[in-house]
Amino acid sequence: MTLTGMMLIGVESHRGRNGEIRAIDPSTGAALDPAFGGGGAAEVDRACQLAWDAFDRFRETAPEDRAVFLEAVARNILDLGDELIVRAVAESGLPRARLEGERGRTVGQLRLFAAVVREGSWIGARIDPALPERAPLPRPDLRQRRIPLGPVAVFGASNFPLAFSVAGGDTASAFAAGCPVVVKAHSAHPGTSELVGRAVQAAVAECGLPEGVFSLIFGAGTSVGTALVADPRIKAVGFTGSRRGGVALMEVAAKRPEPIPVYAEMSSINPAFLLPAALAARAEALGRGFVASLTLGAGQFCTNPGILLAVDGPDLDRFVAAAVEALGGSAAPTMLTPGIHAAFDAGVAALADNALVATLARGLDGDGPNQCRAALFATTADAFLDDPSLREEVFGSASLLIRCPDLESLRAVAERLDGQLTATLQMDAADAGAAAALLPTLERKAGRILANGWPTGVEVCHAMVHGGPFPATSDSRTTSVGTAAIERFLRPVCYQDIPAGLLPESLRDGNPLGLWRRVDGALGRH
Ligand SMILES: NC(=O)C1=CN([C@@H]2O[C@H](COP(=O)(O)OP(=O)(O)OC[C@H]3O[C@@H](n4cnc5c(N)ncnc54)[C@H](OP(=O)(O)O)[C@@H]3O)[C@@H](O)[C@H]2O)C=CC1
Ligand SMILES: O=C(O)CCC(=O)C(=O)O
């Protein structure tokens, strides 16, 4: 497929006139063809109007039809073949194998949401039949289902050009809920975005859905994204990116005459607690495992282990020696964009220049542009508690070890942490007491708590929580990965004494869709 540099507004391809966006190959620094025309207010307006026009029809599509649509998107992405992978490699600097895996995850995610739509429990059907004889007051007939919020604005993420981008988890879960989607493409991978966008656009047409179910807009800077979130026809936002960007969009959404939810996944430093018995038993293996997680994908994961906490002593020294050796020999992979590389270097320099912080190790230097030289630092619990700058995310392979005098101080540090996506416990049986003492704090701080693993690599499944208190996300009640992500785009409606002929199928007597429903409090397929 020839890349056109055009936006996709419903069925149309449209050349933007507001400046040009060119992807940069971060491994060479070279600008890639073609130039993509940036959108403006007119394109945002048109895409939002089409999305609004599509909403009532799309939200009432039968579950089977919506599932078939999600599967068509998955199939069309696979049909793009190698062209998609080659372009994504050029635009992101990520290795081919990683992007092939990410494509598999993206397609699997779409198919999983197809299964969720068919299964139907997301509708949340509840029926409390009328009790006309109840004294002193009769009960009316009450029936509840969940309906989609409306058109959703999705911001593609730089670090997952497929799985968190045009047809990634936010888009898949919004479609599954019945929401049209307007994507603001990430300017780092416009070609990948156009390819995937065309796959989605074709699926909309193949399934006979209204054209406004999907649009794709380009736009560098803040104006297109801001206009999209401010548009009254947009009813929710999905975002993965920087804290600054996420907070700016939260503010735009909150200032609207009708504020809307923003589901922003932003910044997390993912504390890992190295508990004493685990350190005593396997300090060296932990050191090597930690460096493998820290350096995976140049550390460009929001689940990257950015701080370590442990009680100081000889076992911690063994861990440090192993980590320093592994990190010192780690190669310098290419980062996603010159901007992300510059932010990484600035964050590392700030830590290196901090008088309260010691540099333990740096990875190997690279010989190309935008390469990530891994870094490991150490500080004390007191310094960490005193200096709020040490709690900030450095996006990339950089981590800070906090040496604590005892377990009490380790708990005090944990208590001062901001909200996190993950918290990791490295523990053996003898650490159970220390872990139990930490758990209430970790539950308050993080969306996912894991033992004896490392936090990078998020399973797409039913029980996953990829979320957490601010600043990890803007709304700790939800997840952006896994099937529960659909909940973000639904709201309940109750029908009181509505005549049978007007009720949606999901709430009709006789259960024509065969759903699991809660009838008079009892859950069953009735
Ligand atoms: N926690 C996480 O999961 C991630 C964190 N990051 C962090 O973000 C930094 C920058 O990376 P990047 O991916 O570009 O993230 P950004 O937050 O800068 O950008 C994400 C998307 O939002 C848009 N955007 C950003 N700010 C605004 C705004 N104020 N108003 C409207 N739209 C906005 C961007 O537009 P445009 O396309 O024009 O840039 C882009 O489409 C990294 O260095 C890292 O610190 C990055 C990726 C993931
Ligand atoms: O590791 C993953 O699978 C997801 C990580 C993520 O959401 C991110 O880095 O933005």
Image (tube, grey):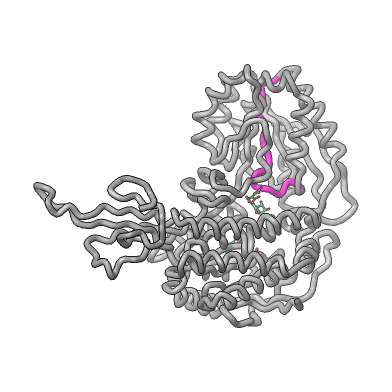
- Residue 509 visible in rendering: yes
Query: Is residue 121 placed above or below 292 in the rendered structure?
Result: below
Residue 63, x across and y down, in percent: 47, 64
Residue 20: which quarter of the image? bottom right
- 341 left or right of 411 in image: right
Residue 31: which quarter of the image? bottom right
Would residue 306 be counted in the magenta stretch?
yes
- 93 left or right of 117 in image: right
Query: Is residue 12 placed above or below 304 in the rendered structure?
Result: below
Query: Is residue 405 placed above or below 252 in the rendered structure?
Result: above
- 36 left or right of 265 in image: right
Q: Extreme right residue here?
A: 367
Q: Residue at x 67, y 18 (%)?
A: 277
Residue 32, x across and y down, in percent: 80, 70
Residue 177, x across and y down, in percent: 48, 61
- Residue 247 visible in rendering: no
What's drawn in magenta, residue-wise?
A: 298-312
